[in-house]
Image (cartoon, rainbow, N blue to C red):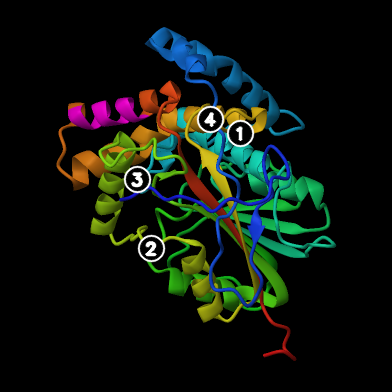
Amino acid sequence: MATSPTTPAPESSPNPPPVESTPEEHDVQHNQDPIEADDPAAFSDYSDSSSLASSTQSITSSIMEHVYTNGRRYHRKSSDENQQYLMPSDETEMDRLDMMHHMGLLTLDGELYSAPITESPHNVLDCGTGTGIWALEFGNMHTESNVIGVDLAPNQPAWTYPNVSFETDDLEKEWTYKKNHFNYIHSRTLGTAIKDWAKYTKQMFEHAAPGAFVEIAEHSVAAYCDDNTVPADSIYITYCTILSDALLKVGVDVRPYSARFFRQQLEAAGFVDIKVMSYKIPWGPWPKSKKFKYMGAVCAEIFRTGLEAYGLMAMTRLQNIPEEEAKSICTEFYKTMLAGKQHGYHLQWYIVARKPETTEA
């Protein structure tokens, strides 16, 4: 799995705006400026495990302060009720999912979504709702909307707003909702779970109301680099290759994921006015810009537990790698992130599309 360069774009801000494709394009050029790296000496503090822990403590505290304010603190259901779910469903994993939500807000400059919603959509479906935090925030913002959050794992709160409800269901099976019903469908971070994207996007199309917007947020499972600091034998590439190969054994192929891939899935389903926005998410606090550095630090904290959450099962059960070796791979990846010498990142895509009005069909 090779690293990928990007084409420079005119400088606009510490975090350049995403590149937005036009309906006629079939792909997105990731032409943001290369992320400038900070002085390597700035990473000398990450030389031992105690420093690694203390360096993320304040970041975690600030994230949790954001996540649990404004009525967002809630009790979660026990993981004992969730035997069929393969990912961890303990408190650590739930905190990681909330941090991923925080990263989404950072990426979109505080916005919950990219779709051009001008008024509160009546019926909203949040696919892969996780802890339910996105659905709760959307419902609190749009009090006239009826929001349903659905996930395979019942990790949502017992308490919720009157206009927000949660359901436990498998989105890869036939949807039981009314067709032509939802005025906005939001789907986020299901890339390592969906086996048949053609079926999934087709069901989105069938259950979206005419004129409704859908939005898919997904990320690459690959190491990108602008300055050749990620070598071919990097632990980044080793981990991503192992994970990709393991997912393939359970029917999930993440290798073709790209702006083009998701655009084509939505086009084939029947959607129009498709726009793809691409962002770089740095792996670790190596960037020089304050915003990118913070995003990289948040990413490192997400990966601190996420590497094992995704990787251990993939490596031990599917790739027959001894548990000790698997944990060593995850640890090396994490330490490499915080060392700041390899300037890796992944791509985050937001794809917005519209179902044609009946008169357009």
Q: Would you identify the image quadrant in which residue 353 lies? A: bottom right
Give coordinates of residue 333: x percent, y percent. Answer: 34, 30
The residue singled out by tag 2 in the image is 256
Whichever of labels 4 and 1 marks the residue nearer the N terminus, that label is 4
Give coordinates of residue 139: x percent, y percent. Answer: 75, 50
Could you give the CA–CA distance between mark 4 and mark 1, rounded to whole angstroms? 10 Å
The residue singled out by tag 4 in the image is 37
Helix, strand or loop at mark 3: loop
Q: Nearer the viewer, mark 1 or mark 2?
A: 1
User: Residue at (35%, 59%) from the top-left corner?
Assistant: 255
Q: Is residue 42 above or below residue 127?
A: above
Q: Is residue 208 above or below residue 345?
A: below
The residue singled out by tag 1 in the image is 292
- What span is in magenta? 325-333
Disc 2 residue crowd, few under 14, some 14–19, many 20+, Cα 10 Å? few
Give coordinates of residue 185: x percent, y percent. Answer: 64, 64
Could you give the CA–CA distance between mark 4 and mark 2, rounded to whole angstroms? 29 Å
Q: Are marks 4 and 2 in contact (CB under 8 Å)?
A: no
Q: Is residue 77 above or below residue 20?
A: above
Whichever of labels 1 and 2 marks the residue nearer the N terminus, that label is 2
Amino acid of disc 1: Phe
Whichever of labels 1 and 3 marks the residue nearer the N terminus, that label is 3
Q: Nearer the viewer, mark 3 or mark 2?
A: 2
Disc 1 residue crowd, few under 14, some 14–19, many 20+, Cα 10 Å? many
The residue singled out by tag 3 in the image is 86
Does residue 140 appear left or right of residue 347 in this picture? right
Helix, strand or loop at mark 2: loop
Whichever of labels 4 and 2 marks the residue nearer the N terminus, that label is 4
Could you give the CA–CA distance between mark 1 and mark 3, rounded to whole angstroms? 32 Å
Disc 4 residue crowd, few under 14, some 14–19, many 20+, Cα 10 Å? some
Amino acid of disc 2: Pro
